[in-house]
Image (cartoon, helix red, strand yellow):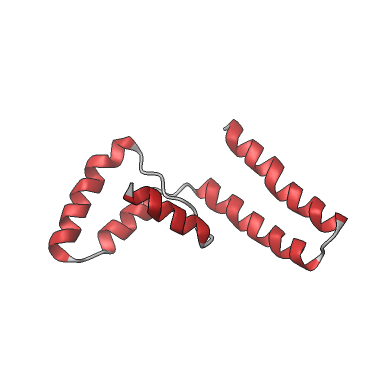
Amino acid sequence: MGRFVVNGFLLRHGYPAINLPAAKQIDFNRLMLDFYDSGDQGPMNAFLRSCLDERVITIMKECRATVALYQNHRGVAGHRLWRRCRSPHLRNYADE
């Protein structure tokens, strides 16, 4: 439940969600225990960053830029930019 809440926070603030693959669960647990003992967040931070999907980051950057354009060019042209950001990239991502 905690990771679900953290992912909601990340998404709300414009960052991608972190997906922890089942194959990495033991590493996650070990790093969390090490973090509790040492208080050093560096190894856990690096681990969680390694779980990020670069495709999602690319899509979010493109959409962020398109939203900025949309805000500057409201109306039909801006709406087309917004639709172009959402539809093709997300459809392509889902097909992979």
Q: Residue furthest right?
A: 76
Total number of numbered discs in the rendering: 0
Q: Where 71 sits versus 83, above or below?
A: below
The residue sitting at 70% across, 41% down in the picture is 88
User: As drawn, is 48 to the left or to the right of 67?
Assistant: left
At horizontal 35% and vertical 39% (from top left) the residue drawn is 21
Q: Position of residue 12 (x, y in %)?
A: 51, 59
Q: Is residue 76 above or below residue 38?
A: above
> Residue lying furthest left in this view?
37
- Residue found at the very far top of the displayed protein: 95
Which image quarter: residue 9? bottom left
Q: In percent of the image, x 59 and y 35: which residue is there? A: 94
Q: Quadrant of the C terminus?
A: top right
Q: Position of residue 61 (x, y in %)?
A: 60, 57
Measured from the top left, where is residue 71 in percent x and y? Answer: 75, 65
Residue at 68% from the left image edge and 47% from the top image edge: 86
The spot of residue 55 in percent (x, y) is: 54, 46
Asked whether 50 or 66 is in front, the reply is: 66
In the image, taking residue 33 as reference, residue 25 lies left or right, namely right
Image side of residue 89 versus residue 44, left or right:
right
